[in-house]
Amino acid sequence: MHEGEHDERHDDGARESAPDGARQHGDPARDAAPDATDVRPLDGFTVGVTAARRAEELGALLERRGAQVLHAPALRIVPLPDDAELLAATEDLIGRAPDVVIATTAIGFRGWIEAAEGWGLGAALLARLGAVELLARGPKVKGAIRAAGLTETWSPQSESLAEVLDRLLEEGVRGRRIALQLHGEPLPGFVESLRAGGAEVVGVPVYRWMPPADIGPVDRLLDAAVGRALDAITFTSAPAVASLLRRAEERGLRDGLLDALRRDVLPACVGPVTALPLEAHEVTTYQPERFRLGPLVQLLCRELPARVRPLTVAGRRVEIRGQAALVDGALRPVPPAGMALLRALARRPGWVVSRADLLRALPGAGRDEHAVETAMARLRGALGAPKLIQTVVKRGYRLALDPQVGAKYGDE
């Protein structure tokens, strides 16, 4: 949920467990193909990671299951230990007690206490927090509260700020002073609901989201997504989604990115609040039932292979993945040009695809149809079974789809 959904809800990598469910280059002559039993669930797929925090951990979990990972932190967290705004909010709360304090993230709560200690206000802040209703949005922030020697009054089972809001509104907030540790971006719906109920809301800005210092990886991820060189993008915070969309708009790629996410690139979000900026653009997202890193990876392990339609070609079972093919269960990495041809053939399996159409499918091939022949030769070599693709003299090429599977052949 925003940064908090990222910070609060993820298991350590060692604690991965399958979720209950979800919403919806080798030379074969030189290198032996892997055994079918060696194929991992994400072999052949490429996944973009937009996380600012724990990106290495998420990337390692994906790579362990075979994925190629494109790291592109979409934002950075800027702590505010010397920020005048945070100091003023802290002094105000110490001087005039709130009725309720809502701690939303562990990293933010710890940062607040550490900053107060640096100003010589640590003991006074802890005393104040110990005397008010202290709400913890998730288990990790509960841990941070207890590590500071405090005890939370209540924490929602759903780890959702929406449940916190419901509880407060049911209790009644008129005339109450509520301090809210901010995520790094405004929470207008949450704050406005409290104010509409008659509460005074004091924001505690512990850190802010900023654009990444190096925008290059984000631009590469955008290009890969729009060019369908990615199979999925993972999102672990709503600000990361907003930042990526903002950069796409700056580059004139927002429509292309949204189209890719609606059609070909699976958008995997750690939870429902993270998904909101995408769903506002009518992008259907995929989420694990448990909002943590392990289940997010397991979601991809289930959803990406399920998108592949197996074909029976020349007596072999073929599955076309993002950057590879499984031939009778053995992984065959395929160069990008070869994958472009293979996908073009697989769109109409068994039908002839002309050299001109295949040339158009090749990225940056120009007008020389010889490029098709060169890429086709390399594709056949990579697949390790040349008979999978038939040459139709003077017409083009087609996948040698087995007639017994009921597919229709034709020359158009």
Image (tube, rainbow, N blue to C red):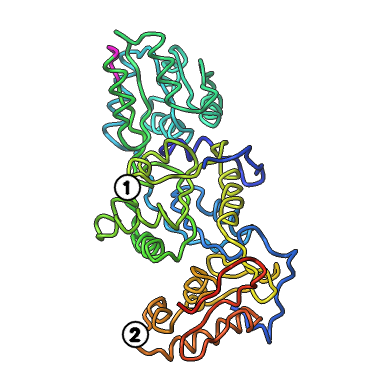
Residue 323 image position (x, y, % from top left): 54, 69
Q: Compared to 410, does 158 lie above or below?
A: above
Q: Earlier in the sequence, mark 2 or mark 1?
A: 1
Q: Which numbered disc covers residue 290? A: none
**What is the distance, in whole Å, between disc 2 and disc 1 at their CAs?**
40 Å
Residue underneath mark 2:
366
Query: What is the quadrant of the N terminus in the image?
Result: top left
- Are the two marked residues, 2 and 1, in contact with CB atoms closer than 8 angstroms? no
Residue underneath mark 1:
210
Mark 1 neighbour density, 10 Å: few (under 14) some (14–19) many (20 or more): some
Q: Is residue 200 magenta?
A: yes
Query: What is the quadrant of the C terminus in the image?
Result: bottom left
Q: Nearer the viewer, residue 37 or 152?
A: 37
The secondary structure type at the circle numbered 1 is: strand
Q: Is residue 152 magenta?
A: no
Question: Which amino acid type corresponds to the residue marked 2 in the rendered image?
Answer: Gly
Which-is-in-front pick, marks 2 and 1?
A: 2
Residue drawn at x 34%, y 43% as measured from the top left: 209
